[in-house]
Amino acid sequence: MACDLRGEDLSVNLEKYGPWALVVGGSEGVGAAFARKLAACGLRLVLVARKLRPLEELADELRTRSAEVRIASVDMGASNALQRVRAVTDDIEVGLLIYNAGANSTRGNFVELDPSVYRSVIAVTVVGQSEFAHHYGAAMCHRGRGGIVLAGSLSGYMGAPSLAPYTGAKAFSRVFSEALWAECGPMGVDVLHLCLGFTATPAMARLGYDLATAAHADLVAQEALDHIAEGPVWIAGGPQNRERARQRSIVDGRAQAIRAHATPAREPVSRN
């Protein structure tokens, strides 16, 4: 049984990815777009995010459409994040994990950052994706069905000034997803690294970005659902983002490539 979201051929396979979907980072932006689409397909949802109020508001919205929704307000940078989420999922069967947490709000020269900044980035993206994929992926592989979507960024294709922890963590996410895809595919579990470009989300708006040219969160979520079975990597946002990924993947002449194609720093990088 499948829910056709596009009116075309590919949709959400409820038998493979149900009955519950866990959306980490699911209170706003791309995560909320995922939640609305999956609820429309009849999947039951567990939504996880740090801020309780947006979670409650989205859950109430989805429940008015007859969706079954559980929520968990969890700081994904905390060492007990998985244990806290498991408290609301251990009695259910999660067939789809969407790990969408990992936005960056602090930039600066790495050696000048407060250690709490880079530790949080690594905890959410590197440790968090690993632990959640390990726990929920193991159950999926045992059942012989399921899906995992790990969100990354075009920034993960190249190191960039003022973004060292973020770009490094996103590079881990992509390579990790590729390996996980190769391992889990033969066991019936689809794995997709969703590579995001510049996307219009509340997090980006709060950072003061002009979102006029940004991709719409709803379209990005739809791209992932349309291509979940075509892993290991899907670069959202069209041909221009795929070209940026190619430019940032040049092997020879890395110094020149970084100067030409890296995400620019918000402020001039100190050379002192």
Image: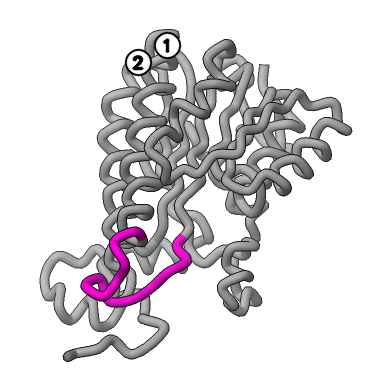
On the picture, is 75 further left or further right than 177? right
Residue 87 showing in the rendered view: yes
Q: Position of residue 182 (x, y in %)?
A: 28, 29
Horizontal placement of 141 versus 93: left or right?
A: left
Please tell me whether mark 1 sits on a helix, a strand or a loop.
loop
Write down the region rendered in magenta: 104-116
Alpha carbons under labels 1 and 2: distance apart = 5 Å
Q: Quadrant of the N terminus?
A: top right
Q: Residue at x 36, y 55 (%)?
A: 121
Label 2 belongs to which residue? 187
Mark closer to the chain start, 1 or 2: 1
Q: Quadrant of residue 165?
A: bottom left
Q: Does the rendering let one see residue 226?
A: no
Q: Is residue 241 above or below residue 8?
A: below
Q: Vertical placement of 2 versus 98: above or below?
A: above
Q: Position of residue 256 (x, y in %)?
A: 18, 81
Q: Which residue in the structure is indicated by mark 1? A: 144
